[in-house]
Amino acid sequence: PRTYVVVVEGPVDLSTQTHLSDALDRLRVQGAQLVGLGLQKVNYMSSAGWGLLAATLKELRREGGDLVLLSMNNELEKTFRLLQFHKVFQMVSSEKALRAHAKKLDKGRLTQQTHESAKTGPASAGGESVAGKVAVPLEEAIAGAIADYGPVSIPTLKRLLNEKGYKKVGYLHLYRTLKTMDLDSQAKRLRFYRSC
C-alpha cells in the first residue's frame, strides 16, 4: 500500500490541529493507504487532536487502509494509555515495524479481494452467504480481524465482525469461539497478533 510517514512537532490542540488535518487530508487525496504518525516531538495533544486522529483512522480503515502511531514521548503515551487509545490505534516502534504492518495490510487486502470475488454458493462449515458473498468461517474472520487490527477488545471485535457480515454473532457466542481458539484474553490476542 502507499505508505507515508508524518512527523508531528509541538502541541496539537484546537488552534494547531487544522494544520495536521490539512496534511492528513492531502495524503488521503494523494492515495495514502497507510499513514505512520511520528509523535515523539508532540508535547501536548488536546481532545481535538485525539478526535482528529480517531476520525482519520476510521476513514482510512473504511477505505482498507490504516493509521499507525510511531513512537511517542512518555507524557503523551501516559495520556494515550489513560484514554485507552492503545485499544484503538496500532502503535509501532520504528519505520521497519511500519513496513511490516504495511505487508500485513497488503496481505489482508488480497485475502479480502479473494473472498469478495468468490461465487455465491453453499456456505462452508461455520460460514454463511451474505449479500452475494461467501463469508469465511467465523474462526477465520476472528483471526483476520485480530491480525489486521491488533488485540482488540471483545466489543470492538464484535463490531468488526458485524461490519464483515456476521450480524447474528452475540457476545456469548463470540466469547465461546474465542475460548475454543485460545484467544479469550487480551494477552492471548496480543501474542497471536505478534505471531502474525
Image: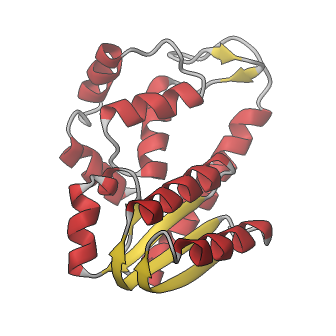
The image shows residue 179 at horizontal and vertical percentages of: 23, 26
In the image, 2 versus 13, the foreground residue is 13
The image shows residue 97 at horizontal and vertical percentages of: 43, 76
* Residue at image location 59% in from the left, 17% down from the top: 124
Q: Where the C terminus falls, by quadrant?
A: bottom left
* Residue at image location 57% in from the left, 50% down from the top: 58
Determine whether, in the image, residue 81 is placed left or right of residue 48: left
Vertical comparison of 5 with 179: above or below: below
* Residue at image location 41% in from the left, 61% down from the top: 90
Find residue 113 and report its image quarter.
top right
Determine whether, in the image, residue 78 is placed left or right of residue 195: left
The image shows residue 16 at horizontal and vertical percentages of: 52, 77
Determine whether, in the image, residue 55 is placed left or right of residue 109: left
How many marks are shown on the rendered structure? 0
Determine whether, in the image, residue 47 is placed left or right of residue 82: right
Vertical comparison of 107 with 39: above or below: above
In the image, 24 versus 161, the foreground residue is 24
Q: How is the image coloured?
A: secondary structure
The image shows residue 121 at horizontal and vertical percentages of: 75, 14
Extreme-front residue of the structure: 15
In the image, 9 versus 69, the foreground residue is 9
Find residue 178 and report its image quarter.
top left
Q: Where the N terminus falls, by quadrant?
A: bottom right
* Residue at image location 80% in from the left, 24% down from the top: 119
